[in-house]
Image (cartoon, rainbow, N blue to C red):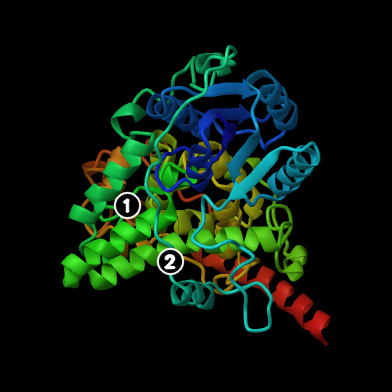
Amino acid sequence: MKKTIVWFRQDLRLHDNHALCAACAKGEIIPIFILDDNDRKLGGASKWWLHHSLSALKQSLGGLVLRRGDPLSIIQSLIHEAKADGVYWNRGYEPHIVQRDTEIKSTLSNNGFDVQSFNGSVVREPWETKTGSGGPYKVYTPFWKNNLAAGIPAAILNPKIELATIDNLGENLTDWNLLPTNPNWSKDWNALWTPGEAGAIARLNSFLQEDIKGYGELRNRPDLPNISRLSPHIHFGEISPRYICEKAYARKTKIANYTNDIDKFVAEVGWRDFANHLLFNFPDIPVKNWKPAFDVYPWRESKADLQAWQKGLTGYPMVDAGMRELWHTGYMHNRIRMLVGSFLVKHLQLHWSHGEAWFWDTLLDADLANNTTSWQWISGSGADAAPYFRIFNPISQGPKFDPKGLYVRKWCPELSELPNNLIHRPHEATTIELKAARIKLGKTYPHPIVDHKQARIAALAGYEEVKIAQAAKTA
């Protein structure tokens, strides 16, 4: 019987897994996950999720080989040990992964092995969606319209799995030390998250059953539950975008009133495809401004301001609540991600790479394509970017999206006794009002580290330099 190695990566699931299904159709499989030390070092939050996701996958498969090191060397050794005939995997689109996989496929194929890769993480491959002129898309809306017009492929069913027997199962998951200790800052996360394929499917079903109603508008409200919270599951491939879209559209056929909400939700899934499309076609996005004119922007350097932002001590409650939510849960509401991102690059004028690095370490869903694309978008330097003059007001965003202050009160409890009209602007409260709420500005809660109006003027002045640079380039 033929034996095929299935190399799991960011596709830690059984359903809609093309590499797994193709291998199972041939015969016995040898599932393996390789911790590649040449990859960008995982952030602490991602390590926690990966540990639990691999544990869940091993249980679902009935076994999983775990090894750490150079993938080509490990796969070659495993082929010899198990007398395997080939290697199958689902593709990734990060620049170093594309290069690595191309070299591995070439080497193994030249040695006579059956090597195949498949689409496992996007609706359509990044090279399949093209503009009328044959190039990549640079704007999201026409990109996603093109994908929808082409149709979303159906998800495939779970395969029948037969595991091959091998003597060396590799390393123990616990020996990888992915879980935090001394201190265990993730001790409360088990009550918040259920990593793994079963948890992903359960979360999708719950969202489509209960929280999809009103999603089109209410997804902007961090004080309400109308969000999917699927992003970590999607990043680790515990659920596929094709499966998500299929289940969402099935729900839409049952309840017509949800049509607009479901279409908006599916469009949000499409943004992740767009991010991978950009990363594949413009591989310098993680390290360079997509718009070179932004190289002249007068970024500041301030370790103190960066740390205040990271710790949720900026003196702007909505910003601080978001940063504290991130630290305590490994997650941040998408509306708040835009707000804290805008605050970092526009109010503090700190380079977007500082924010990208912090999110990489603290987000459970830290994803190179989505993270860098989104940070460049909010900075104005990326594709389909937010207009440079769009500077989120960290004060007025509060009453608009957290009208009763529930989100701020949850994550900034020192402000909880302020009335609704002051919860988002404690620095405007009178001495009497602050005393009544038991707040001492500068002690129990910080003064704003920057004045909003002055910061906006400074940011716009910086963007004027970018406009001048752009004009000179096109002149």
Residue 68, compared with residue 101, is above or below; it is above
Q: Quadrant of the N terminus?
A: top right
Mark 1 or mark 2: name the one nearer the start of the chain: 2
Residue 81, compared with residue 448, is above or below; it is above
Mark 1: amino acid: Ser
Residue 69 placed where, x, y %? 70, 25
Residue 348 is left or right of residue 187, and the answer is right
Residue 427 is left or right of residue 218, and the answer is right
Disc 2: which residue: 152
Residue 462, compared with residue 233, is above or below; it is below
| Camera sees residue 79 | yes
Mark 2: amino acid: Ile
Residue 313 placed where, x, y %? 46, 42
Rendered image: mark on residue 228:
1
Residue 350 placed where, x, y %? 64, 53
Toward the front, the furthest residue is: 1
